Image: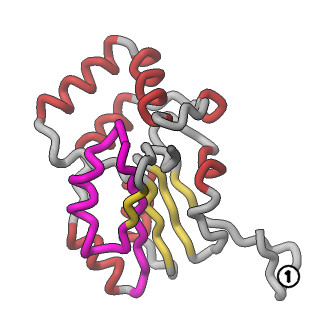
Amino acid sequence: MKTSTRNSAERYSVKYFNGFSLHGEERLFSEYLIQSDLCVAGFSYGAQQALEYVCNTTQRVDRLILLSPAFFQNQKPSFMRTQLRYFQNSREAYIQQFLANAASPSGIDLSSYLTPGTQEELEALLSYRWESEKIRKITDRGTTIEVFLGSEDKIIDAPAAFDFFAGKTVTYWIKGAGHLLRD
């Protein structure tokens, strides 16, 4: 963490939005994050929230970092219904399977970051629509948007997400990496 030359007690840190059913996982992404009050980042579900925050804030943001953004808009409505049904039938089993898929292929134990999500959060995550106009609005203000995607992601359709974000943002394709951007 950097300290300010104006006031040694002042600290700079990235504004970070957590993934679904997670809290504190930003430590897993330290190599991608910039410790600056002018940076906003989010992982998966948190990437959706980060984009909305930056789109609606009047505060200066130099960089928006989207880590494995939750991208489901190419899925059929039956996919969303099925996911919600599984969640309603057994929230605990659904979240455990979700975390296992998120950790693949790295096998990182995410249990210390677990904060079980709600059905409302899952619905918001699954139904979110990434909009080119919002991305353009943000970049027109001078904010750089960086998107990081893993080629082996078991949560999202990473190739479809790449096709959407490439050309609109600085988009990185990490070979062999999963949702946590690790292999």
In the rendered view, would you say 178 is above or below 143?
above
In the rendered view, would you say 58 is above or below 152?
below
The residue tagged 1 is 7
- Residue at 59% x, 34% y is 108
Residue closer to the observer: 183 or 25: 183
Residue 127 shown left or right of residue 31 in the figure:
left
The colouring scheme, among rainbow, by chain, secondary structure or one colour, is: secondary structure
Is any atom of residue 79 visible in this view?
yes
Q: Which residues are magenta?
A: 142-171
Residue 127 shown left or right of residue 24 in the figure:
left
Let me know if residue 153 is in the magenta part: yes
Is any atom of residue 47 visible in this view?
no
- Residue at 19% x, 48% y is 73
Let me know if residue 175 is in the magenta part: no
Percent from the top left, x then y, of residue 109? Answer: 61, 30
Residue closer to the observer: 127 or 76: 76
Label 1 amino acid?
A: Asn
- Residue at 61% x, 66% y is 14
- Residue at 64% x, 74% y is 36
Percent from the top left, x then y, of residue 162? Answer: 27, 60
Query: If the image is split into quadrants, where does the N terminus sit?
Result: bottom right
> In the current view of this chain or complex, which residue is farthest to the right?
8
User: Circle 1 sits in a helix, a strand or a loop, which is it?
Assistant: loop
Percent from the top left, x then y, of residue 10? Answer: 80, 74
In the rendered view, would you say 23 is above or below 79?
below
